[in-house]
Image (cartoon, rainbow, N blue to C red):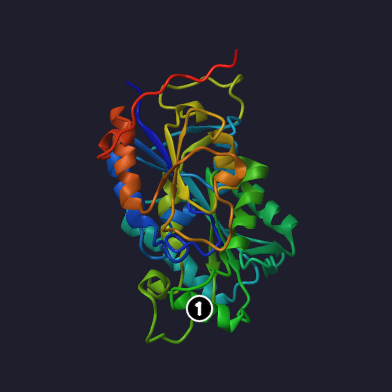
Amino acid sequence: MRPYTAILIVPTGVGAAIGGYAGDALPVARVVAQVCDRLITHPNVLNGASLYWNLPNAFYVEGFGLDKFAAGCWGLRPVRNNKIGLLLDQGIEPELRLRHLQAADAARATLGLTLTDYVITDAPLNVELRTTLSGTSWGTIGNPDSLLRAAEILIKKAGAEAIAVVARFRDDIDEEAVQKYRHGEGVDSLAGAEAVISHLLVRTFQIPCAHSPALAGTPPEPDLAPRSAAEELGYTFLPCVLVGLSCAPQFIVERKTIALEQEDIWAEGVDALVVPANACGGSALLSLSQTRCQIITVEENKTAIEVPPQALGIKSIQVNSYLEAVGVLVAHKAGINPSALCPKLSSLQPVVTNH
């Protein structure tokens, strides 16, 4: 029997009640990973700044790559270890840059990760933050060419197989938005811009990538929300990114021209997808809704957007919580219709025919 494969998605920068903060969807991922053979998810779910968790059966896939995978364009090839290239924004001040380099060296010495020598962009990236009318976050890169040139050096000259990007984010972020985020409300102002950076690199070079923001230190917050607290543990958010990229699957972009391996994963092998109930407009979900993949939508995980499955004509099993979603996954894996676990089961009816 083939491995049971589930995808867990919590969209970035939409203020998800669970997964909209600092790695606070990690407990969900840990539980889901226990009930499926393979869990495919993305950095927003697994990144917790200095906190992370080794899930041997989880695959850390950047959002653009996940969309291409779900559409059937790319496959995923599991790896034992990636050589990670560290890409630093020229706009990072010397002391803050040193903090990130020391974090990278710590990952090499303490965790045994493999990194290439680093590259600094030839111009500041000048990342700008933006917010939509609905409150979701996105952003722009002032010098995308500089980002691409640095990545190309890491790949071609240093032999990088995955790229960790550290971009300097401005300190004049909307103070009200920051305070809401630190108190466990509102939207992560940085997340949308981070996605723009990683999407550009994955689209261009087709290798794993994830981003870690460089920020000036902030005073301690006495009323800090636990879901935001992981970001207060150090000077950099880099450790979780390096851990995730160290074993992120490589992308197979030419199915017809590459020798396939038994461990390769393709969209037709995905059994289930779990997503917040009002965030169903993503490319990956729209693609998989056209397949046999079971869509499970979680009502409790509210976001700043309102795109329910019904509005798109998508059939899903709607549950209230992730605990309930896990139960549905267990039943689905066992080949049991979840309705059979309810106290009332409707009788079979004749198929309606038109004569």
- Compare residues 183 and 298 and report the one nearer the observer: 298
Which quadrant: the N terminus?
A: top left
Identify the residue shown where x is 38% and y is 65%: 50
Quarter of the image holding residue 233?
bottom left
Identify the residue shown where x is 66% and y is 47%: 152
- Compare residues 257 and 53 and report the one nearer the observer: 53
- Compare residues 63 and 144 and report the one nearer the observer: 63
Which quadrant: the C terminus?
A: top right
Instruction: Give the answer, above or below, for where 1 lies relative to 312.
Output: above
Q: Amino acid at mark 1?
A: Lys
In this view, which residue lies farthest toward the top? 355
Question: Disc 1 designates what residue?
Answer: 180
Question: Whole-percent x and y of residue 2?
Answer: 35, 23
Q: Is residue 54 left or right of residue 146?
A: left
Instruction: Give the answer, above or below, for where 354 lies relative to 44.
Output: above
Question: Whole-percent x and y of residue 319?
Answer: 39, 48
Quarter of the image holding residue 195?
bottom right
Identify the residue shown where x is 62% and y is 68%: 135
Question: Whole-percent x and y of residue 218?
Answer: 48, 83
Question: Whole-percent x and y of residue 243?
Answer: 40, 53
Q: Secondary structure under badge 1?
A: helix
Q: Is residue 216 visible?
A: no
Instruction: Give the answer, above or below, for where 84 lies relative to 172.
Output: above
Q: Dot 1 surroundings within 10 Å: few (below 14), some, or many (20 or more)?
A: some
